[in-house]
Image (cartoon, rainbow, N blue to C red):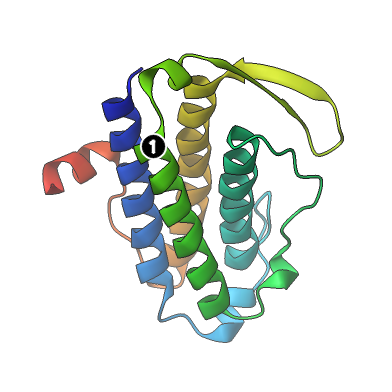
Amino acid sequence: MNKNDIQLLYQYNQWANEKILDAASDLTPEQFLADAAYPHGGLRGTLTHILFAEWLWRKRWEGESPTVWIKPEDFPTFESLHTRLQEEDQALSEFAAGVTDEQLNSVIQYKTTRGDPKEDTLWHLMAHLVNHGTQHRAEAAVMLTAFGRSPGDIDLIVHLRSR
């Protein structure tokens, strides 16, 4: 994996997140806050989980090992969560832009939120985060579609063809 490949994946990640956020922008507050039978609950919980994972992994890559969790209750409105997700996507893009091929292939050490020590190759973790987001964006897309607000196709190839 090289810097250009990682940057492409993070451009896709940001594009796909924005498609989900755009589709969610017209939801009522009740729809945004509604519970659902998904691993992280409804749309607010699922989007918060995406944000938390992006923030947590970026912090680990920057040398920190946070022990706190970002919670859905931290975002009482769609606008508050939308703003924070956009900020995190920008921070991830900046991280991806600054990483070198050497760093991508290096092993980083970090701790889980419970304090367990781990180590992995940076590019594996960065690819994992995009893949993780794909799962939860798909869950969000199903919820949005049920509300009549489908985000449309969010596949990588669709992003590549739209460039």
Q: Amino acid at mark 1?
A: Gly
Q: 23 or 83: which is nearer to us?
A: 83
- In the image: residue 41, left or right of residue 144: right
Q: Residue 161, how many percent across, how many down?
A: 13, 42
What residue sits 35% from the left and 64% below the top? 150
Residue labelled with disc 1: 98
- In the image: residue 117, left or right of residue 82: right
Q: Residue 45, how many percent across, how many down?
A: 65, 61
* Mark 1, secondary structure of its residue: helix
Residue 141 to residue 106: above or below: below
Residue 131 to residue 31: above or below: above
Residue 67 to residue 2: above or below: below
Residue 114 occupies which quadrant of the picture?
top right
Label 1 neighbour load within 10 Å: few <14, some 14-19, many 20+: few
Q: Residue 50, how many percent across, how many down?
A: 57, 51
Q: 120 or 100: which is nearer to us?
A: 100
